[in-house]
Image (cartoon, helix red, strand yellow):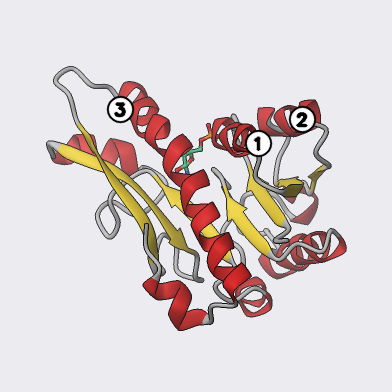
Amino acid sequence: MVRLGILVSGTGSILESMLDDGLPVVVVLADRPCRAVEIAERASVPAVLVDRSEWGGYGANFDRDGYTRAITDALGSHKVDLIAMAGFGTVLAQPIHDAYPMRILNTHPALLPAFPGWHAVKDALDAGVKETGCTVHYAVLAMDAGPVVAQQAVPVLAGDTEATLHERIKDVERRLYPAAIRMVMSELDKGSDADGLKEAVL
Ligand code: GRF
């Protein structure tokens, strides 16, 4: 049975959808105090705050390598074998990708490769596109890159604000991400290698 670890920073509505779906979440790690920690605790899932402010915070003094080690160690101590980032606001360093190759998933609120980065929803609105969406993908060191597992389009409606559009996208993410994780879990159960995982798309 796959043991899933979730990385969070925010409101945790995507995490909530995973827990509602019954995914085998064994630990939730947060990089800052956030509502997602309460969501985990309410579901009686171990939640650990690995507060990046203890590793130099958000500026130039952030010890990314040390922080990455702390997250990797926490995942290891819970015997996690598949990681899902769900609104996680820290870019981790290469060693976690070496420790968990093709075992880290992310969801991004745009149709990658369009609109990578922290402001994907605003960037799509500003670009005036009629359609954006969400992408579930394997994470690699480069932000919002890596093999795609699933994508779904979401229309941009007249009068949309960043908040209304993001909420419509998150509605889709809350269904698509758990389904994509289940698909990856079944590939892992079958013993698929990296090539098999890359080919299995939802
Ligand atoms: C999602 O849109 C995700 O794609 C992005 O952050 C959001 C997380 O939402 N990276 P929540 O904190 O789970 O509500």
**Relative to 12, residue 200 above or below:** below
Q: Earlier in the sequence, mark 1 or mark 2?
A: 1
The residue at 48%/47% (across/down) is 179
Q: Which mark is residue 19?
A: 1
How packed is label 1: few (under 14 Cα within 10 Å), some, or many (20 or more)? some
Q: Which mark is residue 165?
A: 3
Give the structural element (helix, strand or loop) at label 1.
helix
The residue at 15%/41% (across/down) is 127
How packed is label 2: few (under 14 Cα within 10 Å), some, or many (20 or more)? few
| Percent x, y of residue 7 | 65, 49
Q: Earlier in the sequence, mark 2 or mark 3?
A: 2
Q: Earlier in the sequence, mark 1 or mark 3?
A: 1
Give the quarter of the figure containing the C terminus. bottom left
Q: Which mark is residue 93?
A: none
| Percent x, y of residue 91 | 56, 59
Residue corresponding to mark 2: 43
Identified by mark 2, the residue type is Ala
Identified by mark 1, the residue type is Leu
